[in-house]
Amino acid sequence: MTSLGIYVHIPFCLSKCAYCDFYSKCGTKGEYNKYTEALCYHIESSDMRSSGYEVDSIYFGGGTPTAIGARNLIKILGSIYRSFIISDTCEITLEANPNSVDLTMLRKLHRAGFNRISFGMQSASAAELQILGRTHTFEDVKNAVTAARKAKFDNISLDLMFALPNQTIGDFLDSLDAAIELSPEHISCYILKLEEGTPLAKSLDAASLPSEDNQADMYLAAVTRLSDEGYEQYEISNFAKEGFRSHHNMKYWTLGDYLGFGPSAHSLMDKKRFSYIRDTEKYIAALEEDGDVTEKSEDISTAERCAEYLMLGLRTCDGISADILENNYLVSFDKIEKVLLRYHESGHTDFDGLKWRLTPEGFLISNHIISEVLDALEASKHILDLLSKE
């Protein structure tokens, strides 16, 4: 059977973080219940038990999924189990704010089938958490991880942010060390991005952000520290102990099929990409009227998949292969290899005899390298087009 990932978007938060530009909103218990009913209807009307797909990854993201309560989350998961064939080893992830869970809730969720939890720690510093508009403390993080362990979660991830206003390398490493001390199986380290229109972007003086050199030093220090502690870097921002890479994120980076549910959710299936209405009320109303909640839909050409293979592959430590490019996409690797060889001389790329990948230093300038690789791809395709016309 073909493997499939499922993403469930829960658009509710107890409060909106100052840096967030994801689609989310504050809600009431009545809204949570109404949304749950609509979401379950959408899932069950998409019944795919005879489709030839087997679900090996389910990811509840948001928003703050735990805002709607364990009862609603378990109800949604039940709808998925009734509507899809689920692998016995399916990874079922739940995002949560550290102060949005307790032991009773976590036990209910684990018994229902959730087996991985991702906490938005962001920082161990009270001052930095306040700048980000987070409502939890580091004590809440410690309590949440302890409760998750008691509830028998053996796959815990912590998200951190760096390059925060006035943050030093020492400040960031203090937070990273605090996270490592909690022994999560997975750690993500994301650089702060000031998204236009967010409260933080409106209020922050850009001069307070660390310089590009300091950001690079933070990143490389994190890669070294995490490696020393047994965390394998498998993507630009993601690190895991052996056997604990995020199954769902790997779907995105390896062009696997995934199906999203909820407002603003995206899907990629059968070489088609589509997304749903980015409005909770309109999403529910559309389901009640005719069931069509699609906002955008497009077919993905072989040329586009080829470009995505290169772009996404170079984001991961698995890298890209000349054999795959030439055999699957019928494109010569020669011009692309010339770009990678040039960056190899400066220590930004690495080759193990089978695959090319970016080094940690290469990840720092990944946008530049990937842009050049895609330019080389276009040149290679142009040459093939000319040859095919002769």
Image (cartoon, rainbow, N blue to C red):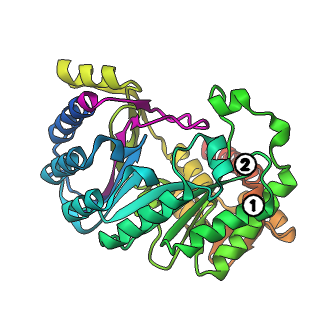
318 relative to 300, above or below? below
Let me know if residue 25 is in the magenta part.
yes
Residue at 72 percent of width and 48 percent of height: 164
Query: What is the number of the mark on residue 372?
Result: none
Stretch of the chain drawn in magenta: 4-31
| Any part of residue 91 in sight | yes
| Separation of residues labelled 2 and 1 (CA atoms) | 10 Å
Name the residue nearer the viewer: 165 or 344: 165
Quadrant location of residue 197? top right
- Image height of 29 relative to 288, above or below: below
Is residue 362 positioned above or below 19 on the image?
below
Task: Identify the residue shown where x is 12% and y is 51%.
Answer: 82
Q: Residue at x 72, y 29 (%)?
A: 203
| Up/down of 276 relative to 118, above or below | above
Instruction: Give percent across and percent down for residue 13.
Output: 42, 37
Percent x, y of residue 50: 13, 52
Q: Position of residue 177 (x, y in %)?
A: 65, 71
Q: Is residue 71 left or right of residue 27?
A: left
- Assess whether mark 1 and mark 2 are in contact (beta carbons under 8 angstroms): yes
Quarter of the C terminus within the rendering? top right
Residue at (39%, 61%) from the top-left corner?
A: 117
**144 left or right, relative to 259:** right
Kindly report which numbered mark, 2 or 1, lies closer to the viewer in this rendering.
Answer: 1
Tell me the number on the disc at residue 171: 1
Circle 1: residue type = Asp
Classify residue 282 by image quadrant: top left
What amino acid is found at the position of numbered circle 2 in the picture? Leu
Residue placed under numbered mark 2 in the picture: 164
